[in-house]
Amino acid sequence: MKKTALSDEILMTIDKPARYLGNEMNRIVKDPASVKVRFVMCFPDVYEIGMSHLGIQILYGMFNEREDVYCERVYSPWTDLDSIMRKEDIPLFSLETQTPLAQFDFLGITMQYEMCYTNVLQILDLSKISLLSKDRMETDPIVIGGGPCTSNPEPVADFFDILYMGEGETSFDALFDLYIAHKENGWDRKRFLHEAAKIPGLYVPELYEVSYHADGTIQSFRPMFDDIPEKIKKQVVTDFDSAYYPTRPVIPYVKAIQDRVVLEIQRGCIRGCRFCQAGMIYRPNREKNIETLKKQAHELLQSTGHEEISLASLSSSDYKELGELVEFLIGDIAQTGVNISLPSLRIDAFALDVMQKVQDIRKSSLTFAPEAGSQRMRNVINKGLTKEDILKGSSLAFHGGWNKVKLYFMLGLPTETEEDIREIVYLAEEICETYYDEIPKEERNGKVAVTISTSFFVPKPFTPFQWVPMDTPESFLKKAYLVNETLPTQLNKKSMRYHYHEPNLTYLEGLLARGDRRLSKLLMIAYQNGCMFDSWTECFDFEKWKESIRQWGGDPDFYLYRERTKEEILPWDFIDCGVKKEFLWKEWERALRGEVTPNCRMQCSGCGAMLYKGGVCFEDQN
């Protein structure tokens, strides 16, 4: 039996000690002495969140398929254990072998959300690894980051030795082979990083220099050596069916946020919503073969014992074989007592028919994401959804037995007016009226319940809105109050509820999403001032952040509220994500004109993703 890094006394005093034991079903056990590369994979949040992350499960299984690599896992210790580890001087350790992280060759950190950045520093600090890459010694692990936030890695550039752009299935083998050669040839750390920078998709921040104009905008961003690329090309899996997929995922003892089997049916999206970063950076849309999915579904359920299977994609309704797949799942899997979860569906007759077969209608609610209240605004953001679509979907749902509806919107979208905001409530009112007008009293499952939720818009990199200013927290709140004051004027006000997000959190998310590497200093100060687990309401302390910004001395307004010009060099322009900057600018111009761009299956818009030679760009061309 392995020795645990934490004593029984400590385990007895902390919340959910099973988070730190690593004895889960399907974990991979190897002899560390038998491998050439030891890699520890980190999700900088609590265990329950990290264990729900499909990307880590994929890379964990894929890395461990190599006999010469052993990949283990680590997550952020919750605040109770964090305090004990600092007090007792206990270094952060891996789950599988309880090895201190400083003894690994690589520490890989997934950056899923900007508000986890201070937890990156927690991981490094508790591991006794220098926070700044320039201060690391030859014996320190190579710290590598990946995930969607690498679409602009500059605010955390000072903390990482390498940042991986794109999907992890493509370039890691080359990196591991290089590292083995590095050890065999006795190269120093700088030589290894220089050679790593030549591998497609790998960005080594210390090998690039940035200069600035007097007004603070970027003057130039260039490599310091001629043999490394000026632009880092995002990596994409083109042969989706042959790519590794974990059919024996690790099963946590602690209930995870997503406590179910996940079946990834496609990557990318055909829709082109102008606010959606994922819809741009994961292009092109690639579907998995239905026979592959059927096989994987069986293997996943047999190896896990889970009682629910969820279809993962940005827009499940756009999977071309969805009807056949769902029929298979209902006929072959649902009969065994396994539930089927179908997120990201566009609510139409097909989707509702399917959901009637797999859900308890009386207990479940339907989710619509119109994103904007008025048709004008939905055209601006290229949502591709009309009010008629929404009301028809609601009608079908009500006739099918549902009476609970959740509506998701954004406030602070470009060109938004007061009338656009009020239209959020008017749309909810029309949905209520649809219920009472169309469903006879004797057939109703009680009153209709419509929940309105609004988040605040952040203009993200690699979207057509990347040039626009963001709203202030005060403006966000005024808009939320406008929704709130419009609601009581409606006939069906008692059938509606309204929730809105924390504007101060959105303020920081926008700052970190759009910033440059000068923000690394702010993150360091914020962490030293006690900021950590910022995405958790009970831990988020905006006063500490305000004090940290004061100590930093920079101007957040420069990053948040300034309109960028077409010619400005943006902090993320050194990344080639496939979607061309010219295409994004044209989409911004179309947004201003309220023009809708057809989805990728209807008409190619020339975004640039065809360079990957796969997916929807090449369908039906054989």
Image (cartoon, grey):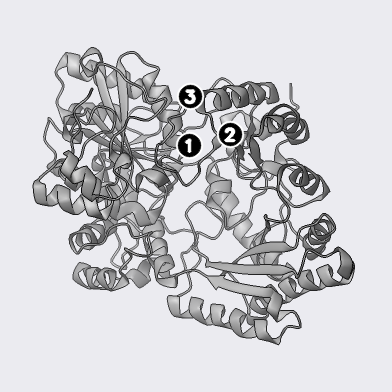
Q: Nearer the viewer, residue 227 or 25?
A: 25
Residue type at the position of mark 2: Glu
Q: Position of residue 301 (x, y in %)?
A: 57, 27
How far, Cα to Cα, is label 3 from label 1?
A: 12 Å
Decide: marks 3, 1 in contact (CB < 8 A)?
A: no
Q: Name the image quarter holding the C terminus.
A: top right
Decide: marks 3, 2 in contact (CB < 8 A)?
A: no
Q: Name the image quarter holding the N terminus.
A: top left
Instruction: Name the residue beneath numbered marker 2.
Output: 264
Label 3 sits on a secondary structure element that is loop
* Count of marks overlaid on the render: 3
Q: Nearer the viewer, residue 303 or 368?
A: 303
**Vertical placement of 342 versus 367: above or below?**
above
Q: Position of residue 7 (x, y in %)?
A: 16, 39
Q: Earlier in the sequence, mark 1 or mark 2?
A: 1
Q: Disc number at residue 54? A: 1
**Vertical placement of 144 versus 88: above or below?**
above
**Vertical placement of 408 versus 231: above or below?**
below
Q: Position of residue 619 (x, y in %)?
A: 71, 29
Decide: marks 1, 2 in contact (CB < 8 A)?
A: yes
Residue type at the position of mark 3: Arg
Instruction: Name the residue beneath numbered marker 3.
Output: 248
Residue type at the position of mark 1: Leu
Left or right, 309 with respect to 147, comes to: right
How far, Cα to Cα, is label 3 from label 2?
A: 14 Å
Q: Earlier in the sequence, mark 3 or mark 1?
A: 1
Label 1 sits on a secondary structure element that is helix
Left or right, 428 with respect to 160, comes to: right
